[in-house]
Image (cartoon, rainbow, N blue to C red):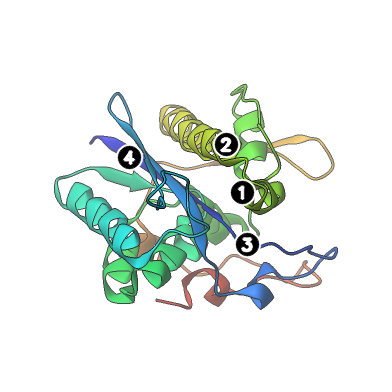
Amino acid sequence: MALLTFDIEISNEFNLRPGEDLERYAPFDISVAATKVVDGEERLWLTKAPNGVPCMNLDRTHARELLGYLEAMQREGHMLVAWNGLSFDLRWIGHAAGDMATARRIALKLFDPMYQFFKLKGFPVGLAKVGEGMGIKATKLMDGADAPKQWRAGNHKAVCDYVIGDVRLTADVVRAIVQARRISWITMKGTPSSVSIQRLRTVEECMRDPMPDQSWMSDPLQESKFSGWL
Protein backbone atom coordinates (compact mmCIF):
# COMPACT_ATOMS: atom_id res chain seq x y z
CA MET A 1 0.00 0.00 0.00
CA ALA A 2 1.44 3.37 -1.04
CA LEU A 3 2.12 5.74 1.85
CA LEU A 4 0.95 9.37 1.98
CA THR A 5 1.82 11.57 4.95
CA PHE A 6 0.44 15.02 5.71
CA ASP A 7 0.81 17.79 8.27
CA ILE A 8 -0.50 21.29 8.92
CA GLU A 9 0.77 24.43 10.61
CA ILE A 10 -1.59 26.90 12.22
CA SER A 11 -1.44 30.67 12.03
CA ASN A 12 -2.92 31.38 15.45
CA GLU A 13 -0.37 32.85 17.82
CA PHE A 14 -0.51 32.35 21.59
CA ASN A 15 1.77 31.49 24.47
CA LEU A 16 0.88 28.31 26.32
CA ARG A 17 1.51 28.23 30.04
CA PRO A 18 3.01 25.02 31.47
CA GLY A 19 0.31 22.35 31.47
CA GLU A 20 -2.19 24.54 29.62
CA ASP A 21 -4.48 22.78 27.15
CA LEU A 22 -4.03 23.93 23.55
CA GLU A 23 -7.72 23.26 22.91
CA ARG A 24 -8.78 26.30 24.90
CA TYR A 25 -7.60 28.41 21.95
CA ALA A 26 -9.53 26.43 19.32
CA PRO A 27 -10.78 26.67 16.60
CA PHE A 28 -7.55 27.02 14.64
CA ASP A 29 -6.71 28.49 11.25
CA ILE A 30 -4.24 26.81 8.89
CA SER A 31 -1.33 28.77 7.46
CA VAL A 32 0.15 26.01 5.30
CA ALA A 33 -0.15 22.25 4.89
CA ALA A 34 2.10 19.68 3.26
CA THR A 35 1.53 16.26 1.73
CA LYS A 36 4.09 13.66 0.73
CA VAL A 37 3.59 10.54 -1.33
CA VAL A 38 6.50 8.28 -0.46
CA ASP A 39 8.65 7.88 -3.59
CA GLY A 40 6.36 10.41 -5.21
CA GLU A 41 5.36 14.05 -5.10
CA GLU A 42 5.57 16.51 -2.25
CA ARG A 43 3.07 19.37 -2.23
CA LEU A 44 2.52 22.52 -0.25
CA TRP A 45 -1.03 23.76 0.25
CA LEU A 46 -1.49 27.47 0.92
CA THR A 47 -3.38 30.47 -0.37
CA LYS A 48 -1.58 33.28 -2.16
CA ALA A 49 -2.59 36.89 -2.74
CA PRO A 50 -2.68 38.23 -6.32
CA ASN A 51 0.91 39.46 -5.87
CA GLY A 52 2.05 35.91 -5.04
CA VAL A 53 2.64 36.49 -1.34
CA PRO A 54 1.19 33.77 0.94
CA CYS A 55 -1.96 34.81 2.76
CA MET A 56 -2.30 34.52 6.50
CA ASN A 57 -4.70 31.56 6.25
CA LEU A 58 -5.56 28.73 3.90
CA ASP A 59 -8.91 29.81 2.48
CA ARG A 60 -11.98 27.60 2.16
CA THR A 61 -11.45 26.88 -1.54
CA HIS A 62 -7.91 25.61 -1.06
CA ALA A 63 -8.82 23.75 2.14
CA ARG A 64 -11.53 21.91 0.20
CA GLU A 65 -9.02 21.08 -2.52
CA LEU A 66 -6.72 19.60 0.11
CA LEU A 67 -9.52 17.62 1.73
CA GLY A 68 -10.67 16.35 -1.66
CA TYR A 69 -7.13 15.33 -2.55
CA LEU A 70 -6.75 13.36 0.69
CA GLU A 71 -10.05 11.56 0.17
CA ALA A 72 -9.28 10.77 -3.47
CA MET A 73 -5.85 9.39 -2.60
CA GLN A 74 -7.33 7.32 0.21
CA ARG A 75 -9.95 5.86 -2.12
CA GLU A 76 -7.22 5.02 -4.62
CA GLY A 77 -5.59 2.84 -2.00
CA HIS A 78 -3.02 5.12 -0.41
CA MET A 79 -2.29 4.63 3.28
CA LEU A 80 -2.94 8.09 4.75
CA VAL A 81 -0.82 8.74 7.82
CA ALA A 82 -0.54 11.76 10.09
CA TRP A 83 1.00 11.91 13.55
CA ASN A 84 -1.84 13.00 15.83
CA GLY A 85 -3.79 13.57 12.61
CA LEU A 86 -7.04 12.42 14.19
CA SER A 87 -7.10 14.95 16.99
CA PHE A 88 -5.48 17.83 15.12
CA ASP A 89 -4.69 17.89 11.41
CA LEU A 90 -7.84 16.39 9.90
CA ARG A 91 -10.11 18.13 12.36
CA TRP A 92 -8.83 21.56 11.43
CA ILE A 93 -8.60 20.82 7.71
CA GLY A 94 -12.28 19.91 7.91
CA HIS A 95 -12.99 23.09 9.83
CA ALA A 96 -11.13 25.26 7.30
CA ALA A 97 -12.94 23.52 4.44
CA GLY A 98 -16.34 23.83 6.09
CA ASP A 99 -16.78 20.09 5.51
CA MET A 100 -16.55 18.10 8.70
CA ALA A 101 -18.48 15.17 7.18
CA THR A 102 -15.71 14.48 4.67
CA ALA A 103 -13.05 14.97 7.34
CA ARG A 104 -14.79 12.35 9.50
CA ARG A 105 -14.94 9.84 6.65
CA ILE A 106 -11.23 10.24 6.01
CA ALA A 107 -10.41 10.15 9.72
CA LEU A 108 -12.00 6.75 10.32
CA LYS A 109 -9.73 5.17 7.68
CA LEU A 110 -6.70 7.23 8.71
CA PHE A 111 -3.59 5.61 10.18
CA ASP A 112 -2.55 7.68 13.19
CA PRO A 113 0.33 5.94 15.01
CA MET A 114 0.09 8.42 17.87
CA TYR A 115 -3.56 7.53 18.50
CA GLN A 116 -2.73 3.83 18.24
CA PHE A 117 0.06 4.37 20.79
CA PHE A 118 -2.36 6.23 23.08
CA LYS A 119 -4.79 3.30 23.00
CA LEU A 120 -1.94 0.99 24.01
CA LYS A 121 -0.22 3.11 26.69
CA GLY A 122 -2.83 5.64 27.81
CA PHE A 123 -0.70 8.72 27.14
CA PRO A 124 0.49 10.53 23.99
CA VAL A 125 3.99 10.76 22.55
CA GLY A 126 5.56 13.29 20.20
CA LEU A 127 6.86 12.55 16.73
CA ALA A 128 10.34 13.85 17.52
CA LYS A 129 10.70 11.57 20.56
CA VAL A 130 9.63 8.56 18.51
CA GLY A 131 11.97 9.52 15.70
CA GLU A 132 14.80 9.65 18.21
CA GLY A 133 13.76 6.35 19.74
CA MET A 134 13.59 4.69 16.32
CA GLY A 135 17.09 5.91 15.53
CA ILE A 136 16.04 8.38 12.85
CA LYS A 137 18.22 11.45 12.65
CA ALA A 138 16.24 14.57 11.85
CA THR A 139 16.97 18.25 12.23
CA LYS A 140 14.01 20.27 13.46
CA LEU A 141 14.16 23.62 11.69
CA MET A 142 12.11 25.31 14.40
CA ASP A 143 9.88 24.59 17.35
CA GLY A 144 6.29 23.97 16.32
CA ALA A 145 5.11 26.73 18.64
CA ASP A 146 7.25 29.22 16.73
CA ALA A 147 5.72 28.45 13.32
CA PRO A 148 2.75 30.85 13.71
CA LYS A 149 5.08 33.65 14.83
CA GLN A 150 7.43 33.05 11.91
CA TRP A 151 4.53 32.93 9.45
CA ARG A 152 3.08 36.20 10.75
CA ALA A 153 6.55 37.74 10.54
CA GLY A 154 6.66 36.92 6.84
CA ASN A 155 9.15 34.07 7.09
CA HIS A 156 6.98 31.92 4.87
CA LYS A 157 9.75 29.83 3.33
CA ALA A 158 11.09 28.83 6.74
CA VAL A 159 7.66 27.58 7.81
CA CYS A 160 7.12 25.79 4.48
CA ASP A 161 10.49 24.07 4.88
CA TYR A 162 9.52 23.11 8.42
CA VAL A 163 6.18 21.52 7.46
CA ILE A 164 7.79 19.64 4.57
CA GLY A 165 10.42 18.39 7.01
CA ASP A 166 7.69 17.03 9.27
CA VAL A 167 5.93 15.04 6.52
CA ARG A 168 9.30 13.57 5.55
CA LEU A 169 10.03 12.68 9.17
CA THR A 170 6.58 11.11 9.55
CA ALA A 171 7.22 8.95 6.48
CA ASP A 172 10.59 7.81 7.81
CA VAL A 173 9.18 7.06 11.26
CA VAL A 174 6.22 5.12 9.89
CA ARG A 175 8.41 2.97 7.69
CA ALA A 176 10.68 2.23 10.66
CA ILE A 177 7.70 1.29 12.84
CA VAL A 178 6.30 -1.05 10.19
CA GLN A 179 9.66 -2.73 9.71
CA ALA A 180 10.45 -3.09 13.43
CA ARG A 181 6.87 -3.90 14.49
CA ARG A 182 7.28 -1.63 17.47
CA ILE A 183 7.11 2.00 18.50
CA SER A 184 10.21 3.08 20.37
CA TRP A 185 10.51 6.48 22.00
CA ILE A 186 12.57 8.52 24.43
CA THR A 187 10.70 9.10 27.68
CA MET A 188 10.50 12.37 29.61
CA LYS A 189 13.27 10.99 31.83
CA GLY A 190 15.49 10.60 28.77
CA THR A 191 15.43 6.82 28.77
CA PRO A 192 14.48 4.60 25.80
CA SER A 193 11.26 2.61 25.88
CA SER A 194 9.31 0.51 23.42
CA VAL A 195 5.92 -1.09 22.78
CA SER A 196 5.29 -3.88 20.29
CA ILE A 197 2.70 -3.62 17.54
CA GLN A 198 1.93 -6.21 14.90
CA ARG A 199 0.81 -3.67 12.33
CA LEU A 200 -0.46 -0.15 11.98
CA ARG A 201 -4.22 -0.01 12.42
CA THR A 202 -6.82 2.48 11.29
CA VAL A 203 -8.50 4.93 13.64
CA GLU A 204 -11.72 2.96 13.23
CA GLU A 205 -10.00 -0.23 14.38
CA CYS A 206 -8.27 1.46 17.32
CA MET A 207 -11.51 3.03 18.51
CA ARG A 208 -12.91 -0.45 19.15
CA ASP A 209 -10.09 -1.27 21.59
CA PRO A 210 -10.58 -0.70 25.32
CA MET A 211 -8.52 1.93 27.05
CA PRO A 212 -5.47 0.71 28.97
CA ASP A 213 -5.09 1.15 32.72
CA GLN A 214 -4.64 4.84 33.54
CA SER A 215 -5.14 4.51 37.31
CA TRP A 216 -1.47 5.34 37.93
CA MET A 217 -1.83 8.75 36.27
CA SER A 218 -2.74 11.86 38.25
CA ASP A 219 -4.49 13.56 35.32
CA PRO A 220 -5.13 11.01 32.54
CA LEU A 221 -6.25 12.12 29.10
CA GLN A 222 -9.67 10.95 28.03
CA GLU A 223 -10.07 9.28 24.64
CA SER A 224 -12.64 11.93 23.73
CA LYS A 225 -9.79 14.44 23.47
CA PHE A 226 -8.71 12.67 20.30
CA SER A 227 -11.87 11.18 18.84
CA GLY A 228 -14.64 13.23 20.44
CA TRP A 229 -15.15 15.44 17.37
CA LEU A 230 -16.07 12.39 15.30
Query: Which of the marked residues, 3 or 1, is nearer the chain's N terminus?
Result: 3
* Residue 123: x %, y % from top left: 65, 59
* Residue 192: x %, y % from top left: 73, 33
- Residue at 69 percent of width and 62 percent of height: 13
Q: Residues within 10 Å of mark 2 (few under 14, many from 20)?
A: many
Q: Secondary structure at mark 4?
A: strand
In this image, 29 relative to 128: left or right?
A: left
Camera sees residue 214: no
Q: Residues within 10 Å of mark 4 (few under 14, many from 20)?
A: many
> Label 1, label 4: how many angstroms apart (C-alpha)?
25 Å
Q: Residues within 10 Å of mark 3 (few under 14, many from 20)?
A: some
Query: Which of the marked residues, 2 or 3, is nearer the chain's N terminus?
Result: 3
Label 2 or label 3, whichever lies nearer to me, is: 2
Query: Which of the marked residues, 2 or 1, is nearer the chain's N terminus?
Result: 1
* Residue 3: x %, y % from top left: 31, 36
From this viewpoint, which residue is outermost toward the front? 51
Residue beneath disc 3? 122
Q: Do the residues bearing badges 2 and 1 touch, measured as CB atoms within 8 Å?
A: no
Q: In the depicted view, which residue is nearer to us: 229 or 57?
A: 57
The three-letter code of the residue at mark 3 reads: Gly
| Quarter of the picture holding the N terminus | top left
The three-letter code of the residue at mark 1 reads: Trp
Label 4 or label 3, whichever lies nearer to me, is: 4
Q: Secondary structure at mark 3?
A: loop
Residue beneath disc 1? 151
Residue beneath disc 4? 4
- Disc number placed over residue 162 in the picture, else none: 2
Q: Do the residues bearing badges 4 and 3 touch, measured as CB atoms within 8 Å?
A: no
Q: Do the residues bearing badges 2 and 3 touch, measured as CB atoms within 8 Å?
A: no
